Amino acid sequence: MKRQKTSRKKMTKEERKELMEQLKETPLEKGDFLAMVIAALLTFLPILIIFFGLLFFLIWFFFYR
């Protein structure tokens, strides 16, 4: 597998197009999907917990207090 460009310099349109084609052709490995699901949960779950906690608190504060 070729090493992907990771430099911070601006890429030309041709380099960007070539990189996108390489990414489309590269298949997922065995544990990639599970890793993406776990990463998404670790990213969004704390935000959702805080959001629903605030929503629950506001409902409790205005209607059940």
Image (spheres, helix red, strand yellow):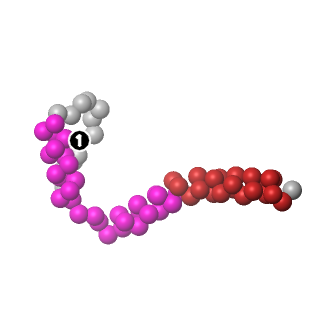
In the displayed structure, does residue 43 sit left or right of residue 22? right
- Residue 43: % across, % down: 51, 53
The C terminus: image quadrant? bottom right
Residue at image position (16%, 36%) is 13
- Residue 57: % across, % down: 75, 54
Residue 45 colored in magenta in the image: no
Q: Main secondary structure of the magenta part?
A: helix
The N terminus: image quadrant? bottom left
Looking at the picture, tell me which residue is in the foreground, 55 or 7: 55
Residue at image position (28%, 40%) is 6
- Residue 19: % across, % down: 19, 46
**Residue farthest toward the bottom in the current orientation of the protein:** 30
Residue 16 colored in magenta in the image: yes
Looking at the picture, tell me which residue is in the foreground, 36 or 4: 36
In the displayed structure, does residue 45 sit left or right of residue 4? right
Give, as a three-letter code, the residue at label 1: Lys
Q: Which residue is mark 1?
A: 5
- Residue 36 found in image quarter: bottom left
In the displayed structure, does residue 45 sit left or right of residue 50? left
Residue neighbourhood size for the residue with mark 1, other residues' Cα within 10 Å, grouped as few (<14), some (14–19), many (≥20): few
Q: Does 48 appear above or below 9?
A: below
- Residue 60 found in image quarter: bottom right
**Residue farthest toward the right in the current orientation of the protein:** 65
* Highlighted range, magenta: 13-42
Please tell me whether mark 1 sits on a helix, a strand or a loop.
Answer: loop
